[in-house]
């Protein structure tokens, strides 16, 4: 079975690498020290500090494995591949809600890099999948829990 590619911008890859380095060089050592300290308290069979530290250690190791895999399968969005005539990964798209007449701007990224609070949406999200491959001026319909929202694609630009 082949691994699923992790689609990232160069900035997204850098953030994952920084997070991985922090987990390996800082967080691992902090938790090891907590475990060492908890063991010094004596009987570990009823030691909640030890149990908490071991759980955190397992979580950190799981995160390290996940990040390693994401980085090893990373496919970087090439700035040269970002088009401005159609919506592609890495493009920043201005949308206007047809009913509300309000505008929003999203950057289309891979799911590993999605951050709705920073207006970075995944190509797999409802809005992302509705706009990918579409052109400026087109209207798309996005199914949401409350019904359907119509967006008009106002502009497409590089990040």
Image (tube, helix red, strand yellow):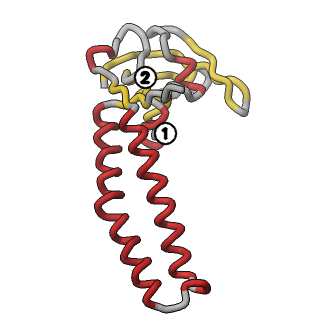
State whether residue 101 appears in this view: no
For label 1, the residue is: 116
The image position of residue 28, as x and y in percent, is 37, 64
Of 117 and 59, which appears nearest the observer?
Answer: 59
Instruction: Between label 1 and label 2, give the one nearer the viewer.
Output: 1
For the C terminus, the image quarter is top left
Residue at position x 54%, y 67% in the image: 55
Dot 1: what SS? helix
State whether residue 157 appears in this view: yes
- The answer to whether 91 is drawn above or below residue 20 in the figure is above
Viewed as shown, does residue 78 lie left or right of 49? left
Residue at position x 55%, y 76% in the image: 51
Instruction: Give the spatial CA distance, label 1 vs label 2.
Output: 15 Å
| Quarter occupied by residue 139 | top right
The image position of residue 7, as x and y in percent, is 41, 28
Viewed as shown, does residue 148 lie left or right of 12? right
The image position of residue 59, as x and y in percent, is 50, 60
Residue at position x 37%, y 21% in the image: 91
The image position of residue 105, as x and y in percent, is 43, 28
For label 2, the residue is: 94
Of 87 and 34, which appears nearest the observer?
Answer: 34
The answer to whether the residues at label 1 and label 2 have Cβ atoms under 8 Å apart is no
For the N terminus, the image quarter is top right
Of 116 and 54, which appears nearest the observer?
Answer: 54
N-terminal-most mark, 1 or 2: 2
- The answer to whether 3 is drawn above or below residue 56 in the figure is above
């Amino acid at each position: 079975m082949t691994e699923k590619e992790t689609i990232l911008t160069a900035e997204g890859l850098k953030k994952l690498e920084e997070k991985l380095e922090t987990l390996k060089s800082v967080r691992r050592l902090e938790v090891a020290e907590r475990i060492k300290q908890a063991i010094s308290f004596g009987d570990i069979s009823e030691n909640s500090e030890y149990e908490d530290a071991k759980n955190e250690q397992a979580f950190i190791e799981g995160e390290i494995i996940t990040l390693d895999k994401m980085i090893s399968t990373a496919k970087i969005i090439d700035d040269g591949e970002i088009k401005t005539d159609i919506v592609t990964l890495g493009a920043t798209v201005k949308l206007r809600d047809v009913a509300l007449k309000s505008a929003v701007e999203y950057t289309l990224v891979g799911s590993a890099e999605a951050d709705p609070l920073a207006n970075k949406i995944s190509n797999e999200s409802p809005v992302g999948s509705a706009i990918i491959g579409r052109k400026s001026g087109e209207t798309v319909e996005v199914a949401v829990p409350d019904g359907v929202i119509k967006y008009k694609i106002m502009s497409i630009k590089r990040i």
